[in-house]
Every structure is written in structure tokens, then in C-alpha cells.
Image (cartoon, rainbow, N blue to C red):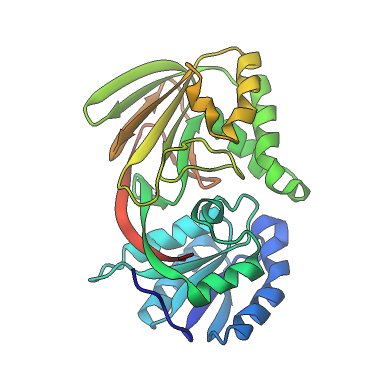
Amino acid sequence: MARLSAPRRLRLLVNPSAGGGRAAALLPDVEAALRGYDLAFRTERTTSVRHARELAVEAHRDGEVPVTLSGDGLVGSVAGALSAVGGAEAPLMGVLPGGRGNDFVRVTGIPSDAVAACAILARGVATPVDLGVVGGSPFIGIASVGFDSEANAIANAAPARLGSLVYAFGALRALVSYRHATFAVEADGEHRTFTGWSVAAANASTYGGGMVMAPAARLDDGLLEIVMSERTSRRHFLRTLPKIFKGTHVDDPAFSVMRSREVHLSADRPFVVYADGDPIGELPTTIGVLPGAVRVLLPA
């Protein structure tokens, strides 16, 4: 890993609606901070995920470092677009927190304050990072199905004023009506069938604004942590929820963990797969990992 020297040309990709408008509100202070570090940059307001992906690839080809000021969904999508470019060295990107969950910065040690995080763009280290992939769609954090599918759908429709609490809100609302499903999990030749709450395939440890679903997951080990939550009562599940914020839920007998480079998932009824807070596919599907697919500016 090599330390970068400023100035370096950046392309700041801003999703104005991210975090309920939080990214747009942060932009003037972020631009002022970048000028303070004598970083050359230009700002692009994205109109869609596809637009952001196109701008990121264009920036890379123009010798600029694309930097997202948005949520985890855009981080994963932009990283995926860059990973497809190819070349002798993985493309480089930067990340500033501008969404509601901001789990990628939480996991990697980037400051949770976007202005403070600008220091990483000036002095950070280019660090290889794995990506997960559902079908052909990339993600940076955790892909999950089952109870998580319903909780994410509710969270995405929740009022923006709830901030990162939308994920806890979604979980509590989904708990009322969720019916256990039967999942089939195949990973590295091992087959598991169980009835329960959910399956998560984790490239990183944390999702949902600080829930440590897969405490042993790492962004640079070329593996997925597959966390399975088997049938329990609603009361038991509710008691478990606070433990997920500490990662101690995996000690509960209802949870089991596998490690694999790839996992095939199916269920006894349709589910949408969510990753980084966004819908990314449907069951049945195969989830894999792309080792060292991009480099990200991270704290030394």
C-alpha cells in the first residue's frame, strides 16, 4: 500500500437525495474542506445509480479519483462499475459519508463526519477491498433475504426524519407480520436447509446503521460470512435484536455461520435480495465475492 501525495484530482459524485437530502446539505462544507486541503476537484450531481456509475468510469479514465458523497448503496454500485474497468491495478475511489446508515465508513474507520473524512482523501492509503456480487450486481457490505427483505422495504419507505433509526423501525414493523420461511443454502459443497428468519451473506461486518450482523467478516479476506437465523419465537427474536448491534447474537444457538467464496440461496417463497440498503436481486440466486476488486482511500 502506498501513501498518496496531494494534490490529486477528484471527481465528487453527489446523490442530492441521499440520506433524505443530507448529502446535498453537506456539500458546501465538504467543498470548502477539500479546498482547504488544496485538493483539485469537480462536483457532479448524480441523477441515478446508472448515471453515477457512468461518471465514475469516466472519471477513472480521465485520471481522476471518483469520490462518493452518498450512502452505502452508491458506494457499492460505483465500486462495482470501477471493478469492471480492468487494468493492471484495481481502480481507486474515495468515500465520504452522506447517507443514513454509512456502514462502510463505520467498518473502515473513515470519520463519520463528512468534513472530517475529507482528510482521508488528502492523506489516506490506497487499500484493496473486496466486493460481493449478487448475480451480476455488486455490493460492498451485506446481502440478505427473508425477514431482512421485509424490514428493508419498510425502512426504505420510512420518513427521512428517522435518519439511521429507519432500520430499527423497519425491523420492528416487519416483526409483526413476518412468517418463517424455509431456506436452502449451498456453500463450498455443504448443503443446509432450515426454517427461520433470514440468511445474510456478508462481505463486511455491519449493516443497517450499525448492526454487526457478521462480526468476523472482513473486507479483504476473499470470503463471505454466511449468517443463518433459524426459527424462534417473536419474543426471543426481539430480545436478540439489541445484541446484533454488538455482534454477540452469533452466540445464540438460533444463529449459525459458514464461510465461503460463494453461496447459492433459495427459499420456499419469493424474496427480494437487499444489499447496502437497496434491492439487488431475487431468489434463487448465487452470491459470490470479487477479491481486491477496487482500492479505496482509507485511514493509514
- The image shows residue 34 at horizontal and vertical percentages of 60, 80
- The image shows residue 254 at horizontal and vertical percentages of 48, 17
171, above or below 298, in the image: above
Residue in the image at 44% along x and 76% along y? 65
Furthest-right residue in this view: 161
- The image shows residue 247 at horizontal and vertical percentages of 53, 33
220, above or below 24, in the image: above
- The image shows residue 210 at horizontal and vertical percentages of 60, 43
Residue in the image at 65% along x and 20% along y? 239
Q: Quadrant of residue 71?
A: bottom right
Residue in the image at 42% along x and 40% along y? 202
Furthest-top residue in this view: 233
Furthest-front residue in this view: 300
Residue in the image at 60% along x and 21% along y? 178
Q: Quadrant of the C terminus?
A: bottom left
Q: Quadrant of the N terminus?
A: bottom left
Is 284 on the left or on the right of 190, as rendered? right
| Total numbered labels | 0
Nearer to me, 269 or 183: 183
